[in-house]
Amino acid sequence: MLKQLIGFIVPCFIAVTAVAQPNNAAIMARKQVPIVCYHQIRDWRPKDSKVAKDYIIPPAAFKEHIKMLADSGYHTILPDQLYDYLTKGTALPSKPIMLTFDDTDLDQFEIARPTLQKYGFKGVYFIMTVSLGRPHYMSKAQVKQLSDEGNVVASHTWDHHRVDRYKHDPNPKKDDWVVQIDKPTKQLEEITGKKINYFAFPFGVWKKPILPEVKKHFKMAFQLADKRDENEPLMTVRRILDSGYWTTKTFSNSLRHSF
C-alpha cells in the first residue's frame, strides 16, 4: 500500500512543480509593441556632436512628442504587461506603447516625470547606479519616488560597461557579473522595496553567447533597434530612440513603421 501511495504522490509532485517555458515561436509571431528610448532631455549645446544629438531631445520637442502620443490615443504599458502579452497573449490596451529612460539623468525626473503625469502616462527608468546622487543625476529618493508613483525602476548596470565583454572571476570584486549586475540590482531592490526583473543593455549592445547569463538574472532585457534573437526574444526586446532630430510627424511615422 505504501509503495502504491508513493507511486501516486511523486508523479503529482513533479507535475505541480514543472515550469512552463515560454514559446519563443509564439513570442516572435506576436505583433511588436512600440517601445521608445530616451536619454538626455535638454537643449542642444554647441559642443554636442551630430551623433550625440540623436540621444539628446530638447524639452520642447519631448513635450510635443508626448502630447502627440496622448492626442493619438496611445496608452502606456509597463514591462509586466508586455511580458504577459508576449508569453501568454494577455490583452493590452488599445494603441499600447512603452516609454523608457536610460542612464538616471536628472532631466528625466524634472522634465519627463511631470510631462508623463500630465497625460496619465507611466514610464520605465533604467538606472545606472554609479550615478545615483551625483550632480545632474537622480538621487536615491527620486528613484524611490518614481517607483512609488507607479513607474517601473529597472537595471542598467553599475557604470555602463558593455555586457558582451563581461567575465566571471573567482574574486567577487573582479567578477563583472557581480559588480555590474548583482550588486546594482540588489541596491535598486533596497531603494524601491521591489524585485528588479528587467534590464537594458548599455549602448543597446548584446551578443548571443551572453544571453543565457542575462536570462539568469532578468525576465526581460531591452536592446535598441537590432533584430531580435529568435531563440531568446525576451532577452532582446527592441526599442527605438526618439531622436533629437525628429519632428512630431517623423516620430509618429517611426512608431508606425518600426514595429
Image (cartoon, rainbow, N blue to C red):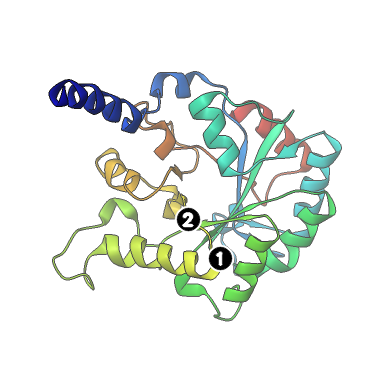
Instruction: Give the image quarter of residue 48.
Output: bottom right
Residue 52 in sight from this viewpoint: yes
Q: Residue at x 60, y 68 (%)?
A: 143
Residue at left 26%, top 55%?
A: 165
Residue 26 in the figure: left or right of residue 72: left
Three-letter code for the amino acid on which mark 1 is drawn: Thr
Residues packed near mark 2 inside 10 Å, few (<14), some (14 to 19) or many (20 plus): many
Q: Nearer the viewer, residue 186 or 75?
A: 186
How would you rate the neighbour count of disc 1 (Cα within 10 Å): few for under 14, some for 14-19, many for 20 or more? some
Q: Secondary structure at mark 1?
A: helix
Name the amino acid type tagged 2. Answer: Ile
Q: Is residue 159 left or right of residue 35?
A: left
Is 129 on the left or on the right of 37, as rendered? left
Question: From the image, which quarter does the N terminus lie in?
Answer: top left
The answer to whether marks 1 and 2 mark residues whose Cβ atoms lie closer than 8 Å is yes
Q: Which residue is mark 2?
A: 196
Q: Position of residue 27 (x, y in %)?
A: 47, 24
Quadrant occupied by the C terminus: top right
Numbered mark located on residue 192 in the image: 1
- Given residues 95 and 136, the one toward you in this image is 95
Image x and y of residue 87, in percent: 48, 28
Residue occupying the point 63% across, 61% down: 147
